[in-house]
Structures are given as C-alpha cells and as structure tokens.
Image: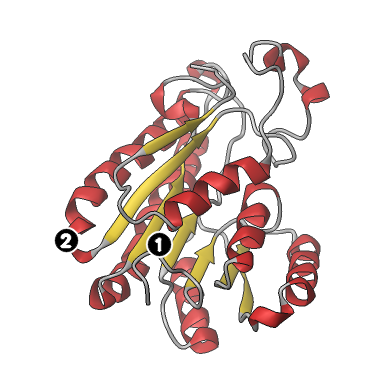
Amino acid sequence: MALNEIRGRLALITGASGGIGAACSHQLAQHGVHLALTYSTNSTSISDLVADLQPRYAEKHLRISIHKVDVGSADQIENLFQEIDSHHGQRPDILISNAGYGKRISNIWDIPLEEFDYMLNVNLRASFILVQGVVEHMKAQRWGRIVFMSSIAASGGGINGCHYAASKGGLTGMMKNLSTRLAEYNISVNDVAPAMIGDTGMVTNASAIPETVATIPLGRLGTPEETAHVVTMLVTTGYMTGQSLLLSGGLK
C-alpha cells in the first residue's frame, strides 16, 4: 500500500452523529475507509448517517459499525474496542478523537468542581484512553494516523471558560508529546483547532451568536465540511506531525 494511501483502512471517529464527526465520516468514506462510528445519545442521527453513507459509497464495499459510547467512561471505551474487534477483526488504523463537551460557563467562580472534572474526562482523558487502545496495532504495522479535535481555546481564546480551555490546552500538549514519541513507528499525531463552526452541538447557527460572528474577520462561521477537509488532509499527509492547525476565519 502506498505511503499515504488510506483506502481499505479502518477509522474510528468519535462523536460522529452530526456536525464535524459526520462530515469526517463522509470524507473518509469517499476515500474508501471503513468506519467505526460512536455516538452518545442521538441514535436517530447516527442511523440516518449510516443510511446515507451505505448507498452513497456502495461501490466501495465499506464496513460501517456504530457504537453507543460515553467517552467520559473508561469502561465504555474498553467495551467499544471489544465491539470493534468483533465487528472489524482489527483495531483502527486511523483515530479521529472528535467527541467533545463544551458547556459554556464563562467565569471560574461559577464552575463547579464536578463540571471541571467531567470536562477533562470527556475532552482530554478520553483521547488518552483511545490512543492506548489503538497504538499497539499502529506500532505493529508501522502506520497510523491520530487526529484530536482541539480548539482555539487551547491557546486561551474562545468563549467557553477556563475549564474548557484547560481541557483543550491539555489535548494539544499531549498531541505534541505523542508526535515525538510515535514518529519512529510512522504514526502521525496532530490536532485541528477550530473556532466558531456552525451546524454543531456547540454552535447551531450564526443567528444564535450574532455578536460573536461580528468579531470574525471572515464575517461568518466555519462549516463542519471545512473542518473535515483539514482532518482528511492530516490523515492523507503522513509527513505532517506534531501540528495544531487553527481553523478560525481569521480570529486569533
């Protein structure tokens, strides 16, 4: 298989029921990538996604599995990997750790400790556990692609509060460390750091936050498809590793 060929690989995409995760699913399916897709609550959306993917890419003969997982639970992630083993007969070659949580509480004095802990479990610890679940397979075959979904908040920006910034900053720090450790195995590790992306659980549309959209130099929200383009580029470009790519419409 060519160095950056991904056709026939297996990708695990967490948080795939809508928004960025669903857009990533479509783009990787176009490349002939088999899919293991997770969702937490929205079974209708994930079923609709698979019902759309299967006939659209029928000629690629894709294996697509769906898994109900709260990535805040280590036990549920372990069960996820057992399900993937039984359905696909292997661990994922590509990990898109996209599932996230972003309850907006702007001021530190308003953030309960339980909220801080849950935010870090979902946005940071889950990616650690997911990498542990895929890395031995990637090392053994000397090929792997890992992409985390970070945020402009990782560098202190954003509107979601310090607990969210801490979770995403930790994610980018972990990415940079892993990229140095895993490069010898031909495993690339990167993250995408979006700002204001519409049609997602965090931001529904521009009319919901007009004052924020007014601060974006490009004057609009980004799209899930634009975010997925960056993910696809990272998955198909093995020579890029250790990078956090800001996708922000000009916001700093």
The residue lying at 61 percent from left, 34 percent from top is 103
Percent x, y of residue 166: 40, 31
Would residue 35 be found to the left or right of residue 208 on screen?
left
| Closest to the observer, 152 or 80 | 152
Query: Dot 2: what SS?
Result: helix
The residue lying at 53 percent from left, 16 percent from top is 107
Percent x, y of residue 125: 39, 50
Image quadrant occupied by the N terminus = bottom left
Residues at marks 2 and 1 touching, judged by CB atoms closer than 8 Å: no
Is residue 126 in view?
Answer: no
Percent x, y of residue 246: 47, 31
| Closest to the observer, 172 or 217 | 217
The residue lying at 33 percent from left, 47 percent from top is 240
Mark sitting on residue 184: 2
Question: Residue flagged by tag 2: what amino acid is it?
Answer: Glu
Alpha-carbon neighbours of circle 2 within 10 Å: few (<14), some, or many (≥20)? few
Q: In this figure, which residue is indicated by the disc labeled 1?
A: 130
Question: Residue flagged by tag 1: what amino acid is it?
Answer: Leu
Mark sitting on residue 37: none
Give above or below for 184 relative to 154: below
Would residue 29 be found to the left or right of residue 84 on screen?
right
In front of the other: label 2 or label 1?
2
Q: CA distance from mark 2 to mark 1?
A: 20 Å
Would residue 203 be found to the left or right of residue 148 on screen?
right
Q: Point out the tag, 2 or 1, that comes first from the N-terminus.
A: 1
Query: Dot 1: what SS?
Result: helix
Is residue 211 in view?
Answer: yes
**Quarter of the figure with residue 52:** bottom right
| Closest to the observer, 206 or 112 | 206
